[in-house]
């Protein structure tokens, strides 16, 4: 059974930082796309940052480039999202997602491409 468990959300002031973690289990982690998506109230879920676990490729939404960094641990079982210079518009529920292994994606930042999801962690940035 695939499980993705997020942690690290919270309340932070604008300009501050948070680090999200996503621990994967019951899953063939290698050669998959894993990443972070977010959804604010009344808005569609959007891709934030994705990496390819079988290599060095990373992908970012324009709105977070230069502020957020996605990475994975050496055991390749945990994905992180370091969020710096946070803005109030970054406030959302953040979800970890993973694609099936050995699968090509058309648009890695499209949430429809992902089969596995965590329960989400709330990030709130106050102004």
Image: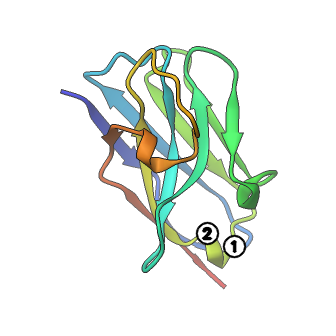
**Mark 1: few, some, or many residues within 10 Å (few <14, many ≥20)?**
some
Which label belongs to residue 111? Answer: none
Query: Between residues 60 and 13, which one lies in front from this camera angle?
Result: 60
> Which quadrant does the C terminus fall into?
bottom right
113 w.r.t. 72: above or below: below
Indicate the colouring scheme.
rainbow
Q: Specify the quadrant of the image occupied by residue 42.
A: bottom left
Q: Specify the quadrant of the image occupied by residue 85.
A: bottom right
Instruction: Judge left or right: residue 117 versus residue 71.
Output: left
- In the picture of the structure, the residue carrying the numbered disc 1 is 87
Report, in whole angstroms, how far the alpha carbon at label 1 lies from the one at label 2: 5 Å
Point out residue 6 in the picture as x, y percentages from the top left corner: 38, 46
Instruction: Judge left or right: residue 4 versus residue 33.
Output: left
Point out residue 44 in the picture as x, y percentages from the top left corner: 47, 68
Name of the residue lying farthest toward the left: 1
Name of the residue lying farthest toward the right: 66
Per the image, label 1 sits on a secondary structure element best described as: loop
**Mark 2: few, some, or many residues within 10 Å (few <14, many ≥20)?**
many
Query: Between residues 66 and 85, which one lies in front from this camera angle?
Result: 66
Per the image, label 2 sits on a secondary structure element best described as: helix
Residue beneath the point at 58% across and 40% down: 107
Residue beneath the point at 55% across and 21% down: 53
Point out residue 28 in the picture as x, y percentages from the top left corner: 35, 16
- In the picture of the structure, the residue carrying the numbered disc 2 is 90
Badge 1 vs badge 2, beta-carbon distance below 8 Å: yes
Q: How many marks?
A: 2
Residue beneath the point at 47% across and 42% down: 21
Residue beneath the point at 78% across and 52% down: 65
> Which quadrant does the N terminus fall into?
top left
């Amino acid at each position: 059974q695939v499980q993705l468990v997020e942690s690290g959300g919270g309340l932070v002031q604008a300009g501050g930082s948070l680090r999200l973690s996503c621990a994967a289990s019951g899953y063939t982690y290698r050669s998959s796309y894993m990443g972070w998506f977010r959804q604010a109230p009344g808005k569609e879920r959007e891709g934030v940052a994705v990496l390819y676990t079988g290599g060095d490729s990373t992908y970012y939404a324009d709105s977070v480039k230069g502020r957020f960094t996605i990475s994975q641990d050496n055991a390749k079982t945990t994905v992180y999202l370091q969020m710096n210079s946070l803005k109030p518009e970054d406030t959302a529920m953040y979800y970890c997602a993973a694609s099936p292994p050995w699968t090509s994606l058309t648009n890695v930042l499209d949430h429809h491409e992902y089969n596995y999801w965590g329960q989400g962690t709330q990030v709130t940035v106050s102004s």
